[in-house]
Image: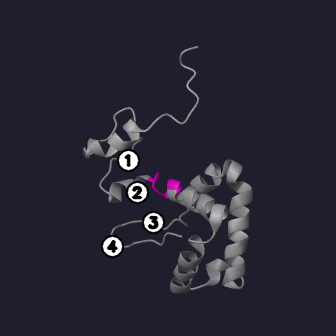
Amino acid sequence: MIPAHEAFGLPAASDSAILADIVRSIGRDLPLIRTALAEIDKRAGGAFAALDRERREALINNWYAAGGAPARALGRVVLSAYYRDDRVLRALGQEARAPFPQGHVVEQGDWGLLDPVKRRKPFWRDDRGR
């Protein structure tokens, strides 16, 4: 789903270290991931990996928007593992470390955008008074 980018020194999501992280993180999404992979191979008319890069990208782009929960699960697990990889973090100008406890500087936005949410009446059961 994510090809290598030689100029920026970025590995592909199919890199062995990233694949190992993907496998470790699938967990409860395994049935959805299996469904997603079966659908991708079906649409590829065989093995997705056997397609050239242009056809793989077109297939994923066309399928992902309408792929539902299996597509979201596959995307989530691939992207999470990819952006945890130290090489990817360094290529993006980030320190190769966990975000906490040191944290990262977050650019301040317009806090006024939350005003409509603050004014909205609660729509949950408030049991704080008990």
Specify whether residue 80 is in view: yes
Labels 1 and 2: the sequence-earlier one: 2
Residue drawn at (38%, 73%), measured in percent from left and top?
A: 6
Cβ atoms under marks 2 and 3 closer than 8 Å: yes
Q: Is residue 26 magenta?
A: no
Q: What element carries label 2?
A: helix
CA separation in Å, label 1 and label 4: 19 Å
Labels 1 and 4: the sequence-earlier one: 4
Q: Which mark is residue 11?
A: 3
Could you tell me the amino acid type at mark 3?
Answer: Pro
Residue drawn at (63%, 83%), measured in percent from left and top?
A: 50
CA separation in Å, label 2 and label 3: 8 Å
Could you tell me the amino acid type at mark 4?
Answer: Ala
Q: Say which residue label 4 marks.
A: 7
CA separation in Å, label 1 and label 2: 8 Å
Residue drawn at (72%, 79%), measured in percent from left and top?
A: 42
Q: What element carries label 4?
A: loop
Image coordinates of residue 129 in percent, x first then y, are 54, 15
Cβ atoms under marks 1 and 3 closer than 8 Å: no
Cβ atoms under marks 1 and 2 closer than 8 Å: yes
Q: Say which residue label 1 marks.
A: 96
Vertical side of 4 occupied by 126: above or below: above
Task: For label 2, count other residues whose C-alpha is less than 10 Å away and answer few (under 14), some (14-19) or many (20+).
Answer: some
Q: Which mark is residue 87?
A: 2
Q: Is mark 3 on a helix, strand or loop?
A: loop
Could you tell me the amino acid type at mark 2?
Answer: Arg
The residue stretch that appears in magenta? 80-85
Vertical side of 11 occupied by 105: above or below: above
Specify whether residue 99 is in view: no
Residue drawn at (49%, 34%), measured in percent from left and top?
A: 122
Image coordinates of residue 54 in percent, x first then y, are 51, 85
Image coordinates of residue 117 in percent, x first then y, are 40, 41
